[in-house]
C-alpha cells in the first residue's frame, strides 16, 4: 500500500461516564491513505494515537451493522464510507437519538426492547399435524421464490440503527417503535410460513407504532442496505388498517 | 450534534449500571436538503388552510347574492391573490409529486391478491388520472361541458 502524506483533521466526540456531564470534542491530526474508509481512520487513532477511544466495529464489510456513527451530522456506516468523501475535516459522533455509553458507543437496549415487541420471528398459530408432516418430509417449510421475493428486501436489514439516528419522529416520540423494528415485523407478516399477522397488526395499531410515522422518508435515505424501511412502515399501516376493517366484518378464527 | 433529543429517546427499559449521556440530535436538520423537503411538505398545510378560508369566503359570498359574489370574484384578481394562487398551485404540484409520485408507489400492499406493479407504472397511472381529472374540471369551469 503506497504511503500518503495527506493529513486529515478528525474531530471525535468523547464522553467518559465517570468524569463528563456531556460529550466533548477532541481533535486529532492524522496521516491518511486514499483507500481508507472512515473506520480505518478511527482504528488508526485508537492504535497509534489515543488508545482510550471507545467505538464498535466488527466485520468491516457492511454486514454486521456495528460501526454506524454520525459523520458530519449524517448517519453512516464507517466501514462503508470512503475517507476521500471528506476534504480536510471530519466530525465523528455517536449515533443520534441514542443514550451515549462512552465516546462513540451508544446504548442499544432501547432498540432491542422495541425490536422484541414486534415478534421478529416466525409465529405458528399452533403446532399442527400437517406442520410436522411437512417438516418430516422436507426437513423445512417449503417456500417458492415468488413468496421469498415478497419480503426479501425487508429481510436485508442489518440492524445498524442508522434509520433510528435519522428519524425525526424517534428524536421526539420515545414510544415510537421505529423503522427497523417495524420493517422486520412487516417482513415476518409477509412471510408465507408465518401466522402471526393478526398479533403483529394489533401491535402495529397500538400507541407509538406505525401511525406515528410521518413518512419523512429519512430512514430509507440513509439505509446502507436499501431495505427501504419507510416503504415497510407505510405498507404496514395499510395492512394494519385492512386487518382492523376485516375484524369488524369477518368472524375471527376460533371465535 | 447541537440539539438535545427527547431525553427518553431510545432509552433502555431498565437503567443500566453505567451512567449515560442524554441522546443528541443534529442541529443542522433544518438546513439538510432531505429534511428541508420534508418540512416544506408539512408547511404546505398552511397554504391549504389559507386556501380553505378563501373557499369558505367564496361560499359565504355566494349566499349573500350576485353582487357580493361579483365583488369577491373581482378581488381575486388582485396581485396579492395572484401570488397566493401561484403559491397554492406550486404547493399542490409539490405535494402531488412527492405523495403520489414518490411515496404511493412503494406503499402498494404485498402478499395480497393484487399484483405489485412497477413503481414507474403506478406513477404513470396516477399522473394520467391527475391530468385527466384536471382537464375535465378545467372544461367544466370553462363552461365547455356540463353547462
Image (spheres, coloured by chain):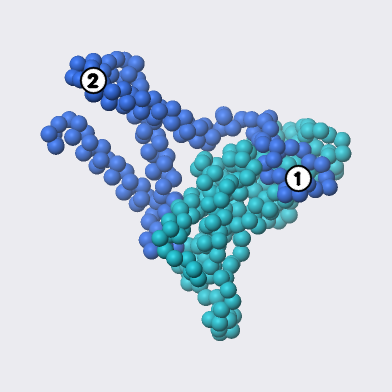
Chain colours: A cyan, B blue
Looking at this rendering, what residue extends furthest in the front direction?
A: A255
Q: Place residue B95 in its image quadrant.
A: top left
Residue receiving disc 2: B64
Q: Is disc 2 placed on a helix, strand or loop?
A: helix
Q: Position of residue B23 (x, y in %)?
A: 71, 38
**Does residue A20 appear in this view?**
yes
The numbered dot on residue B123 is none
Asked if A105 appears above or below A8 in the picture, the reply is below
The residue drawn where x is 65% and y is 52% is: A114
The residue drawn where x is 35% and y is 51% is: B121
The residue drawn where x is 83% and y is 47% is: B17
Is A178 positioned to the left or the right of B59 in the image? right
Q: Place residue B143 in its image quadrant.
A: top left
Q: Position of residue A149 (x, y in %)?
A: 48, 64
**Does residue A38 appear in this view?**
no
Q: Residues within 10 Å of mark 2 (few under 14, many from 20)?
A: few
How far is mark 2 from mark 1, CA to CA? 67 Å
Name the quadrant of the N terminus of chain B.
top right
Label 2 and label 1 in one chain:
no
Name the quadrant of the C terminus of chain B.
top left
The numbered dot on residue A105 is 1
Chain that bears disc 2: B
Amino acid at each position: 500500500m503506497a504511503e500518503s502524506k495527506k493529513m486529515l483533521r478528525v474531530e471525535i466526540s468523547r464522553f467518559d461516564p465517570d468524569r463528563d456531564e456531556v460529550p466533548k470534542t477532541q481533535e486529532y491530526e492524522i496521516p491518511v491513505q486514499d483507500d481508507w474508509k472512515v473506520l480505518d481512520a478511527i482504528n488508526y487513532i485508537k492504535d497509534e494515537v489515543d488508545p482510550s477511544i471507545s467505538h464498535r466495529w466488527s466485520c468491516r464489510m457492511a454486514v454486521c451493522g456495528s460501526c454506524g456513527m454520525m459523520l458530519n451530522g449524517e448517519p453512516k456506516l464507517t466501514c462503508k464510507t470512503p475517507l476521500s468523501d471528506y476534504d480536510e475535516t471530519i466530525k465523528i459522533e455517536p449515533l443520534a437519538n441514542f443514550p451515549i455509553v462512552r465516546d462513540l458507543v451508544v446504548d442499544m437496549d432501547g432498540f432491542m426492547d422495541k425490536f422484541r415487541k414486534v415478534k421478529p420471528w416466525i409465529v405458528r398459530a399452533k403446532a399442527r399435524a400437517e406442520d410436522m408432516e411437512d417438516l418430516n418430509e422436507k426437513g423445512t417449510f417449503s417456500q417458492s421464490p415468488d413468496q421469498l421475493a415478497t419480503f426479501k428486501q425487508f429481510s436485508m436489514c442489518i440492524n445498524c440503527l442508522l434509520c433510528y439516528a435519522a428519524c425525526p419522529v424517534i428524536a421526539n416520540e420515545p414510544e415510537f417503535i421505529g423503522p427497523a423494528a417495524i420493517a422486520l415485523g412487516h417482513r415476518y407478516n409477509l412471510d408465507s410460513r408465518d401466522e402471526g399477522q393478526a398479533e403483529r397488526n394489533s401491535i402495529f395499531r397500538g400507541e407509538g407504532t406505525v401511525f406515528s410515522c410521518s413518512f419523512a422518508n429519512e430512514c430509507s435515505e440513509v439505509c446502507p442496505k436499501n431495505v427501504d424501511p419507510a416503504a415497510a412502515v407505510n405498507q404496514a399501516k395499510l395492512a394494519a388498517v385492512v386487518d382492523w376493517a376485516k375484524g369488524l366484518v369477518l368472524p375471527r378464527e376460533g371465535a | 450534534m447541537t440539539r438535545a433529543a427527547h431525553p427518553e429517546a431510545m432509552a433502555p427499559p431498565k437503567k443500566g449500571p453505567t451512567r449515560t449521556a442524554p441522546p443528541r440530535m443534529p442541529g443542522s436538520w433544518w438546513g439538510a436538503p432531505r429534511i428541508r423537503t420534508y418540512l416544506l411538505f408539512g408547511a404546505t398545510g398552511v397554504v391549504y388552510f389559507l386556501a380553505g378560508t378563501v373557499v369558505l369566503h367564496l361560499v359565504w359570498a355566494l349566499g349573500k347574492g350576485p353582487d357580493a359574489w361579483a365583488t369577491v370574484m373581482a378581488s381575486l384578481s388582485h396581485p396579492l391573490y395572484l401570488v397566493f394562487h401561484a403559491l397554492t398551485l406550486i404547493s399542490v404540484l409539490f405535494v402531488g409529486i412527492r405523495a403520489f409520485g414518490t411515496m404511493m408507489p412503494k406503499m402498494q400492499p404485498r402478499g395480497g391478491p393484487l399484483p405489485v406493479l412497477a413503481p414507474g407504472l403506478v406513477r404513470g397511472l396516477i399522473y394520467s388520472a391527475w391530468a385527466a381529472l384536471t382537464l375535465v374540471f378545467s372544461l367544466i369551469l370553462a363552461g365547455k361541458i356540463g353547462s
